[in-house]
């Protein structure tokens, strides 16, 4: 098929390729050096990475892409996020007891679908800045998981439960969370 420039592909087209070989690119290597070289991706794994010209044995069965105008780096991990809470950003930071007066009353109106929809702007912003993994804990995490899956991203997820002082303080919330965790595929 010949070498195409990375700009010739959409994200969806790249995801459909079983093996991708990015040549002539600038890379941040696993030991944090900046090198000029190549990287071979097979499925979701890095199968080859190196400085200089691509070895001939890596050229078989891969879509070869000239990435000479690009920098390829490891992605970031957001180690503490509340992706659906982007709606609260910059609201009432000076207000006393804002969590109890604003957040908890608003959060009582949430459900899985709303939380999933509210997650999209935050996840997209993270993706555009190079973040591919989110550690998140909030309510209705199933909605956040579905949003992450829609973007093809990873997550470390924990459902927020509390018996006192939250948007959903109750023993029933804990039982629902436990049931959800036990039945999650």
Image (cartoon, rainbow, N blue to C red):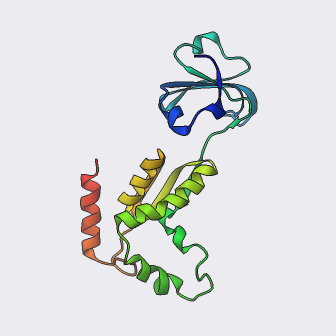
Residue 34 locus on image (x, y percent): 75, 34
Q: Which of 118 and 7 lies nearest the eye of the viewer?
A: 7
Q: Quadrant of residue 23?
A: top right
Residue 120 locus on image (x, y percent): 49, 58
Q: Quadrant of residue 11?
A: top right
Q: Residue sitting at 42 percent across and 58 percent down?
A: 144
Position of 164 relative to 176 (above/below): below
Q: Residue sitting at 44 percent across and 49 percent down?
A: 150
Position of 97 relative to 18 (above/below): below
Residue 64 locus on image (x, y percent): 61, 21
Q: Residue sitting at 55 percent across and 13 percent down?
A: 60
Q: Is residue 34 left or right of residue 20?
A: right
Residue 22 locus on image (x, y percent): 64, 26
Q: Is residue 95 left or right of residue 161?
A: right
Q: Quadrant of the N terminus?
A: top right
Position of 130 relative to 81 (above/below): above
Outermost residue to the top: 56
Q: Which of 56 and 161 lies nearest the eye of the viewer?
A: 56
Q: Is residue 56 left or right of residue 183?
A: right
Outermost residue to the front: 8
Q: Residue sitting at 51 percent across and 53 percent down?
A: 134
Q: Which of 165 and 82 lies nearest the eye of the viewer?
A: 82
* Circle count: 0
């Amino acid at each position: 098929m010949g070498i195409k420039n990375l700009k010739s592909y959409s994200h969806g087209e790249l995801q459909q390729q079983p093996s991708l070989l990015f040549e002539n690119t600038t890379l941040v290597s696993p030991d944090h050096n900046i090198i000029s070289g190549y990287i071979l991706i097979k499925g979701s794994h890095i199968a080859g990475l190196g400085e200089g010209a691509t070895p001939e044995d890596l050229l078989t069965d891969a879509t070869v892409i000239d990435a000479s105008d690009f920098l390829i780096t490891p992605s970031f991990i957001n180690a503490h996020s509340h992706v659906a809470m982007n709606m609260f950003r910059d609201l009432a930071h000076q207000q006393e007891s804002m969590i109890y007066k604003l957040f908890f009353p608003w959060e009582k109106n949430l459900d899985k679908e709303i939380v999933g929809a509210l997650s999209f702007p935050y996840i997209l912003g993270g993706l555009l800045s190079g973040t591919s993994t989110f550690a998140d804990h909030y309510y209705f995490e199933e909605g956040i998981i579905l949003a992450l899956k829609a973007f093809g991203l990873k997550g470390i997820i924990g459902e927020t439960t509390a018996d006192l002082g939250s948007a959903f303080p109750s023993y029933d919330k804990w039982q629902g969370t436990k049931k959800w965790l036990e039945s999650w595929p």
